[in-house]
Amino acid sequence: METRFTNFITAFKAEQIKKRGTGFYWTSVIMGVISPILYFIVCLIRNSNEIKSGIPYNLYSKVIEDTAAPFANFFFPLFIIIMVSRITQIDHKNGGWQLMETQPAYKFSIYFSKFLTLLVANLLSIASFLVASLLCAWLLTYCITIPKNALLELPLYQILSLLIRFFLAALLVTSLQYVISVLMSSFIWSILIGFFGLLLTMFLSPFKLTPVWYPYEILAKVADTTNGSQVGHYLLFTEYIGIVMSLMFLYIGFGWYQHKRFKSAFWGNSTQLFSLLGVLLFGNVLLFWLLKPNEMANHTKTIICGTIHSSGTFQNIYIRDGIANDTIAVIPIKNNTFHYEITDKVIADYYECIIDGKIKSSLFFGTHDSIYLDGKVYGNDVKFDYRGTRLAENQMNEETEFNYSMAEYYLRDNIDLDKPKIIIKAIYNEWKDALMKPNSFRTIDNYVGKSDYTERSEKLVTTKYLNLWQDLVKKRLALYPNEPTKATSQIKEMQSKLSLTDESLLTNESYFNYIKSQLVLKNKQDIDENQKAVIEISKLKSSHFRDKLLFWQVRKSLADANSSEERRRLIATYQPQFTNVQYQTKIGVVYKEIESLGKGKVIPNFVAQTTDGTLINPATLKGKHVVVDVWATWCGPCKQQAPYFEKLALKYKNKKIQFVSLSIDEDVKKWYIEAKSKTKTIMHGHINDKDDFGKKYNVEGIPRFMLIDANGKFVNAKMPSPDDQAFEVIIRKALNLPDEE
């Protein structure tokens, strides 16, 4: 053993002698520092405020995060491809491999001394990258203005962690390229193969088609997750995959090199064959285990806890459901930390998490879940990270990615309505494809949503396509009343997957619309669908599900009612029909709120102040139609809508209409600074008593848009957003202006 080790050291020293004067290690350093240097130059040219953020951040970590992507995605793998090919091809060209084998050295020492040399070069390149990034951050503090919220402490643990993770992640790329380069005597072909693999990653990544085990993807994943594991692991599962695969490649590559031919290496005798099969079997079992997604285990209790990092202090967190805005928990906050146990049963669903009535986010959880909220609230910048038993669920994007739908195209443009089988086939095939997507998301630690979340997602996918089926039935009934559209076996299969009494889906409007469409089929009266729906829902057997369904529909019917008389009739008829007294009370409150904000009702009193101290109230706004935008400087969606609101204000500035922006900011100074920078076409005011205003105008969220007539009466108390074409249509109708072409 000692002789073998001495032999290996000798071979390694020989490799170092051969590298003298070649610039081998200097190339490692240069490729490591390119990304930080380019970043530094860009920051100087732009005198960048790009690294500015309201939330405190570590400047050194930020620079490393920004420079890691180009390093890991391009410069570092390119360096590995070139240097591996270079170290092997020199000996191919000069017959060095054969010459070395005539020396008193083991083939193992020859093969792996070169590989170790490459690993040293990798380590040097990674270390150069990290040092250059830190140096770049330090120099920036002298060259550009650094925000006050930038922290200047060296993140030593993160630096050490990234050094190890980058090194291990690079093992697979290095070993694969090394095996190829040793076996191929052509310098060009080994380079081309490696470069093709790198380019393939760039093509597949935008489409999210890159497998998690792909060598270059494993390296890129380190750059995407510079803070490491979300559950406290030292390495990500992809890095373990890289280690296992690199060992398998090295075993095969060395055996092939040792015996010159694959057949001689692994088919020469039974021992060699069984060794190969054993390594492959053990390696693939490990890979299967590493690739198998994990689910978080249930907790014994239902716990909501966490910490809010902020310069301010907070009092309470309100957890509300999405149907009746029921508050299922009021969580007290002490010293910006909280820990609360919910003892009642909680249906697994998305809930609204509201901090002190101002800061909102969406949270998915249910009974026997433990959720940890790590919040950062600094001025207008808000960030929430949810950990715990619903880690995967709360990281998934609720908004569906755009996917072209042939079935929707047929129905939208009324194509082939006379050939229902074509549309039904499109609906069914798209449904089958879509069922696979809820199962595709995994966290960086290989956790997926629990089975109940996957089932819920599949049900909602089914709901979407059954609603398309219902659209087809409606359209064909209008066009071909004498040709019934019967459900095929495919549609019946879809219908069998969806219960019509699933309480956990009622917060989803698509599911509610599907239930409603099934119920109104029974009603043949010549009345609108809202009336049919509320009548049929009221006929259902008394249950909590029926109460929720009835509440949703009565609330919608009240909001859509054309007169106070219609609203009074609705509340008188259906309020007593709720089994749960709480729903009776809540629908009564909804009625009073909607009635007070109904078309033709006098707007409630309020007082606001403009930037020059002028008072605004309902009396001062009379004489013109008024469009009101309720907003705040800390509200992201408000800022998104502001340009559309300003554009319309400028468009109609010569008409008898005033655009008014009313802020509910607690910090008047922040409002004043932002309001002074905006167009004077809009009247800017700050609400004196935001709580009173919120109650009177039923402000559940912002931005909120309202249209008031010249007599101080509501035209529309809850307008769509200005980026919606319907917003301008409502204004033009109120002003008696013709429709625009």
Image (cartoon, rainbow, N blue to C red):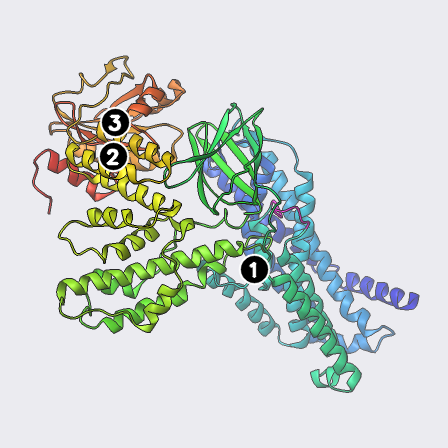
Q: Is residue 432 magenta?
A: no
Q: Residues within 10 Å of mark 3 (few under 14, many from 20)?
A: few
Seen at 49% across and 60% down, the residue is 439
Seen at 25% across and 38% down, the residue is 722
Q: Amino acid at mark 3?
A: Thr
Between tags 2 and 1, which lies in front? 2
Image: 684 above or below 92: above
In the visual, does 190 lie left or right of 365?
right
**Rendering coords of residue 335 (x, y %):** 58, 24
Between tags 2 and 3, which lies in front? 2
* Residue 348 can be seen, yes or no: yes
Disc 3 versus disc 1: distance between alpha carbons? Answer: 48 Å
Q: Which residue is mark 1?
A: 217
**Residue nearest the observer in this picture, 534 or 576:** 576
Picture quadrant where residue 662 is located: top left
What stretch of residues is rendered in magenta?
227-234
Disc 2 versus disc 3: distance between alpha carbons? Answer: 24 Å
| Secondary structure beneath label 2 | loop
| Secondary structure beneath label 3 | loop
Q: Amino acid at mark 1?
A: Glu
**Residue nearest the observer in this picture, 640 or 629:** 629
Q: Which residue is mark 3?
A: 679
In the visual, does 247 lie left or right of 362?
right
Main secondary structure of the magenta stretch: loop
Q: Which residue is mark 2?
A: 718
**Rendering coords of residue 286 (x, y %):** 68, 66
Image: 190 above or below 367: below
Q: Amino acid at mark 2?
A: Lys
| Secondary structure beneath label 1 | helix
* Residue 702 can be seen, yes or no: no
Q: Earlier in the sequence, mark 2 or mark 3?
A: 3
